[in-house]
Amino acid sequence: MADCLFCRIAAGDIPADIVHADERMIAFRDINPQAPMHVLVVPRRHIATLDDLSPDDDQLVGEMMRRAAALARENGYADRGYRTVFNCNADAGQTVFHIHLHVIGGRSLTWPPG
Ligand code: 5GP
Ligand code: ZN
């Protein structure tokens, strides 16, 4: 989608600090990090929210989760712990309507979230 920020980052039209790229997804550092590691795992295909997923996307979402785990491990946070988050719609604070998996690590995280 031409007017979607994450489609434009995936296309290379807007720069980002990219830490992984393959045919189906990219991962880049969040511009406003909430922890020492704050990476967004983003499918190349535009999917607005979790509510727009179909059974055809099961493989994609599984790969996104495994990529998040791999990135946490590469950064040295696998054993001490990290958090993965999909925000969906207003009450969760979703601001970019192209699904993205937050991978947050490097500090002790509180629960419940704010
Ligand atoms: P959401 O609130 O939708 O779950 O998360 C959107 C995230 O995208 C936020 O954490 C925000 O800091 C990040 N973000 C917004 N604009 C940009 C950008 O232009 N570049 C990068 N790297 N991250 C962005
Ligand atoms: Zn998009």
Image (cartoon, helix red, strand yellow):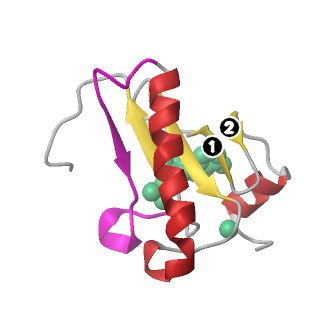
Query: Going by the picture, which residue comes out furthest to the left?
Result: 112
Residue at point 38%, 22% (across, down) = 77
Residue 79 lies in the magenta stretch: yes
Residue 95 position, x and y percent, is 49, 63
Residue at 80%, 72% in the rendered image:
2
* Structural crowding at the residue carrying mark 1, measured as other residues with C-alpha within 10 Å and reported as few (<14), some (14–19) or many (≥20): many
Residue at the image position 49 percent from the left and 80 percent from the top: 55
Judging by the rendered image, the residue that carries numbered circle 1 is 27
58 falls in the magenta region:
no
Secondary structure at numbered mark 1: strand
Dominant secondary structure (helix, strand or loop) of the stretch shown in magenta: loop
Say left or right for 2 vs 44: right
Q: Is residue 31 visible?
A: yes
Label 2 sits on a secondary structure element that is strand
The residue that disc 2 covers is 20
* Label placed on residue 41: none
Instruction: Reply above or below: 6 against 41.
Output: below
In this picture, residue 49 sits left or right of residue 108 = right
Q: CA distance from mark 2 to mark 1?
A: 5 Å
Task: Let me know if residue 54 appears in the view.
Answer: no
Whether 83 is drawn above or below 23: the answer is above
User: Looking at this rendering, what residue extends furthest in the top direction?
Assistant: 76
